[in-house]
Image (cartoon, grey):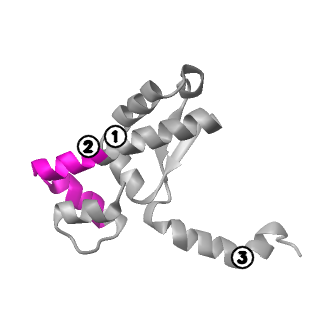
Amino acid sequence: MSRRRLLDAVGLHAADDAALAAALAASASPAVAAEVGRQRRILATALANAVNGLNPSVVVLGGFLATIAEVDLAGLLADVRAQSMPSSGEGLDIRPATLAEDRLLIGAAEAAFAALLRDPLG
């Protein structure tokens, strides 16, 4: 999986996650669809391997991986389950990160206020 390859496919030099997702969604190019499909297959295999080894009930994807997943989330989940051991894939849920592009800002704010969050009255 490669963010650079997705950017190249839609003709962008650089873009944040939201701009990349919008460019992918707006594209009718067969080359873009082929690249997204290729990366989705690789992502499904990588996730299946992780699911087989770790047996999580939920996998949360952020960044450009969430962008790839959101093209067809149900299809990605089906592909991961098809490549996973039945006991590991059963009950699995794959979700895009809800913090999206705010994830780093929120994480930094939590780090800055960690002591206060741990002990609000201290």
Mark 2 vs 3, N-terminal side:
2
Q: Which residue is mark 1?
A: 41
Residue situated furthest top in the rendering:
86
Residue situated furthest right in the rendering:
122
Q: Which residues are magenta?
A: 19-38
How far across and how far down the image is residue 72, in percent? 31, 39
How far across and how far down the image is residue 84, in percent? 50, 28
Above-or-below relation of 23 to 113: above
How far across and how far down the image is residue 118, in percent? 81, 67
Drawn side of residue 46 relative to residue 54, left or right: left
Above-or-below relation of 72 to 1: above
Category of crowding for the residue at label 1, using alpha-carbon neighbours closer than 10 angstroms: few (below 14), some (14–19), many (at least 20): some
How far across and how far down the image is residue 56, in percent? 62, 37
Q: Residue at x 23, y 74 (%)?
A: 13
Callout 3 amino acid: Phe
Drawn side of residue 96 relative to residue 85, left or right: left
Callout 1 amino acid: Arg
Label 1 element class: helix
Above-or-below relation of 47 to 104: above
Label 2 element class: helix
Mark 1 vs 3, N-terminal side:
1
Category of crowding for the residue at label 2, using alpha-carbon neighbours closer than 10 angstroms: few (below 14), some (14–19), many (at least 20): some
Q: Which residue is mark 3?
A: 113
Drawn side of residue 91 relative to residue 116, left or right: left
Query: Would residue 30 be counted in the magenta stretch?
Result: yes
Q: Residue at x 32, y 48 (%)?
A: 39
Asked if the residues shown at circle 1 and circle 2 are in contact, with their CB atoms under 8 angstroms apart, the answer is: yes
Q: Which residue is mark 2?
A: 37
Label 3 element class: loop
Query: Would residue 112 be counted in the magenta stretch?
Result: no
Drawn side of residue 70 relative to residue 83, left or right: left
